[in-house]
Amino acid sequence: MLIDTGSDISWVSCSSCSNCPRTSELGVEMNFYDADNSSTSSVISCSASICTSDECSETNQCAYSLHYADNSGTSGYFVSDLFYFDKIMRTSLISKSSTSIIFGCSTCQLGHLILTDGAVDGILGFGQQRLSIISQLSSHGISPKSFSHYLKGEGSGGGILVLGEILHPSMVYTPLAPSKGHYSVYLQSISVHGRILPIHPEAFANSGDRGTIVDSGTSLVYLVAEAYESVVDAITVVVSPSAKPITSAMYPCYLISSSFAENITEVFPTISLNFAGDASMNLTPTDYLDDMGFVDGAAKWCIRFIKSGLSLTILGDVALKDRIIVYDLARQRIGWANYNCSLPVNVSITSGTYDVTQASTIYHMLEIILFFLYLFWTND
């Protein structure tokens, strides 16, 4: 399953899907949900209050159709079935619980989703609207109206997902901006090497189709044109004594001598994203650079920023990794703190604050959905 904070509707591939991939590029067999073989499954009818679709089949099924920014999509109909959880009540007390969740039964997919390298069993939507996983769980009293994640940036990936709030003394928060569904924030300025760049505030204005969103469903960072060019120009100036800019197909890249290849923090600057509430997110060179190997004996490093084709700045996993991110819907704010994923985390739940010492314990105890076998983060 893909965890996506940029969408609300969750869905799984159904056994009746005609074009869903059967295996992933790694040869892993995909799973399919069979509503007919579930005694607790029920189809959402067209007359249900949550059904806003004008397309209803002869069997009175509430239809859905979703399209994503990478031009992939899915369609099908809504069903409801039981999700099972283990819920931590105290450090050593676990309560088993279940609740009905409404999700999409995907009967057709398109775009990247039908390719083996994009094959998934479905998507869990963690947006803010009423059909998102977190909103449904909160309305059923299963989970607080907050969730947290940590994306491990090095090695084989992985991380932590908590339905609740991870606490940390270094956590900083910025308010959420009013939005129709995205986690929109007020980005006010960008600094490179401690210097605020001369970017007009209008570039970050939250109005119409403009603004800044936090989206775990996007891999990279997308900056509006004015901000992108200003950031790249500033980096180029800072690294000019030691690095040579080169033309690349997608990203701005640099060649540096092999003597600096193992310590890029001596060459490249820190980038600070400055938000409302006096909250800054500092991206170090290891956060935003990608090692592309060697070219003619020189190390090639590329910036994982993309010039946005829209008027929207998107903070994807490049900005989110290696730090705790807290989505506090109840207080309408987002928080973050740098963190080492191998260390314990403090989790705030309804009956108190408890220390959890292993990521595996978190997955077992903290209301994590158990019906899916693999947890992936979306790639665009």
Image: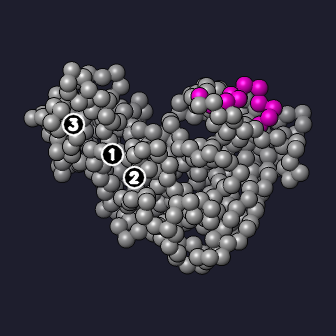
Disc 1 target residue: 287
Residue 248 place in picture, x, y as percent: 30, 22
Q: Write the residue at 66% across / 47% down.
A: 373
> Of helix, strand and loop, which one carries label 3?
loop
Disc 2 target residue: 322
Crowding near the residue tagged with mark 3, few <14, some 14–19, many ≥20 C-alpha atoms within 10 Å? some
Which numbered disc flags the more N-terminal residue, 2 or 1? Answer: 1
Image height of 8 relative to 174, above or below: above
Q: Write the residue at 68% across / 48% down.
A: 372
Please say whether residue 66 is one of the residues in the magenta stretch: no
| The image quarter in which residue 55 lies | top right
Q: Write the residue at 65% across / 76% down.
A: 93
> Of helix, strand and loop, which one carries label 1?
helix
- Tell how many labels: 3
Q: Which residues are magenta?
A: 14-25
Residue 167 place in picture, x, y as percent: 45, 69
Q: Which mark is residue 261?
A: 3
Which numbered disc flags the more N-terminal residue, 3 or 1? Answer: 3
Q: Is residue 207 left or right of residue 356?
A: left
Which numbered disc flags the more N-terminal residue, 3 or 2? Answer: 3
Contact between labelled residues 1 and 2, with CB atoms less than 8 Å apart: yes
Q: Write the residue at 82% across / 36% down.
A: 56
Q: Amino acid at mark 2?
A: Asp
Q: Amino acid at mark 3?
A: Ala
